[in-house]
Image: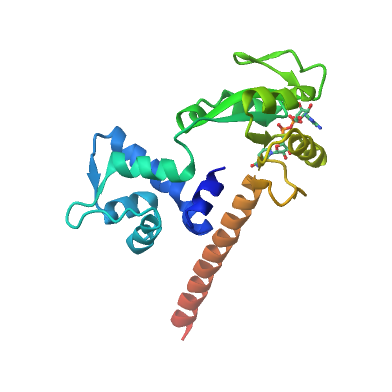
Amino acid sequence: MSADVAARRGIPDASVARLPGYLQALTNLAERGISSVSSEELAAAAGVSSAKLRKDLSHLGSYGVRGVGYEVDRLAYEISTALGLTQDWPVAIVGMGNLGRALAAYSGFTTRGFNVIALLDRDEAIVGAPVGDRTVRPMGDLDALVRDDRLAIGVIATPADSAQDVADRLVEAGVRSILNFAPCVLDVPDDVMVRKVDMSTELQILAFHEQRRTGELDLGRTADVGEVAL
Ligand SMILES: NC(=O)c1ccc[n+]([C@@H]2O[C@H](COP(=O)([O-])OP(=O)(O)OC[C@H]3O[C@@H](n4cnc5c(N)ncnc54)[C@H](O)[C@@H]3O)[C@@H](O)[C@H]2O)c1
C-alpha cells in the first residue's frame, strides 16, 4: 500500500519514512492558519536538515518557490497522495487486551486516513462484547472482512506467542500489510509488508544515549577534578 505507491514513484525508503513527519508538521501549520512555509521552517518543524527536506521533497517533484517556499495545503496533498492517504484504508485490530483497547479508543487514525473497521479476538469471553461503539468479532470473520470490506491492514496486539499465528491468519485471508506491536519477528511471504512498533526498543536506544551522556558528564567531572589536582 503506502510503500507501494511511493516505491512505484521511486522514492527511497528513508525518504518515505520521513514523509509522515513532514505531513504532521504541515497539518500543524495549517491548523495555525499558515498557508506557506520556507524549507528551513518546515525542516525545523519536522526536526530534519533543510537539505534533507529539499532532497526528500524533490522525489515528489516538489521544489518550492524561491523566496516563497512551499504552499502548505498543496504540499500536504502531494505528500498524502504519495503515501496513498487520499483514500481511507480499512484496518482491523487483532487482540482486544490492554493495548488493543487503547488503540481502538484512539480517534486519531480516522483523521489520518485509516478506518478501523473491525476489532477481533479469539477469546470467546471477549467476542461479542462491546469495545467503545464496536463489538469484538471472532477471528473467523477475517475472510469476510477482506472480501466484503476490503480490509487492507491488520494490527497485531496479541502476546508474542500468538503473533505468528495471527499473522498467518491475516495473510491467509489476503491481508498484505501488517503493523505488529508484539515483541517478536514475523515470518511472512515476500509480498507482505510488516512494520513493527516497539516502545521497549525505542526506550533502550534512549537509555543507551542517556548512559553515554551521563558517562560523558562523569568523565567531564573527573577531568575537572584532575585539573584541580594538578
Ligand atoms: N509495541 C509496544 O510498544 C507495546 C506496548 C505495550 C504492549 N505491547 C505488546 O502488545 C501485545 C498485547 O499486550 P496487552 O497487554 O494488550 O495483552 P493482553 O494480554 O491484555 O491482551 C492480549 C489479547 O490478545 C488476544 N489473543 C491472544 N492470542 C490470540 C490469537 N491467536 N488470536 C486473536 N486474539 C488473541 C487475547 O485473547 C487478549 O484479549 C503484547 O505482545 C505486548 O508485548 C507492545
In the orientation shown, which residue stands out farthest toward the left?
67
Residue at image position (73%, 45%) is: 183
Residue at image position (34%, 49%) is: 45
Where, quadrant-wise, is the N terminus in this rendering?
top right
Q: Is residue 107 left or right of residue 80?
A: right
Q: Disc count in the image?
A: 0
Residue 116: % across, % down? 59, 26
Residue 68: % across, % down? 18, 51
Question: Quick check: 94 above or below 205?
Answer: above
Q: Nearer the viewer, residue 4 or 31?
A: 4
Q: Quadrant of residue 49?
A: bottom left
Q: Is residue 25 left or right of residue 224?
A: left
Q: Is residue 194 visible?
A: yes
Residue 194: % across, % down? 66, 46
Q: Nearer the viewer, residue 80 or 24?
A: 80
Question: Quick check: 202 above or below 167?
Answer: below
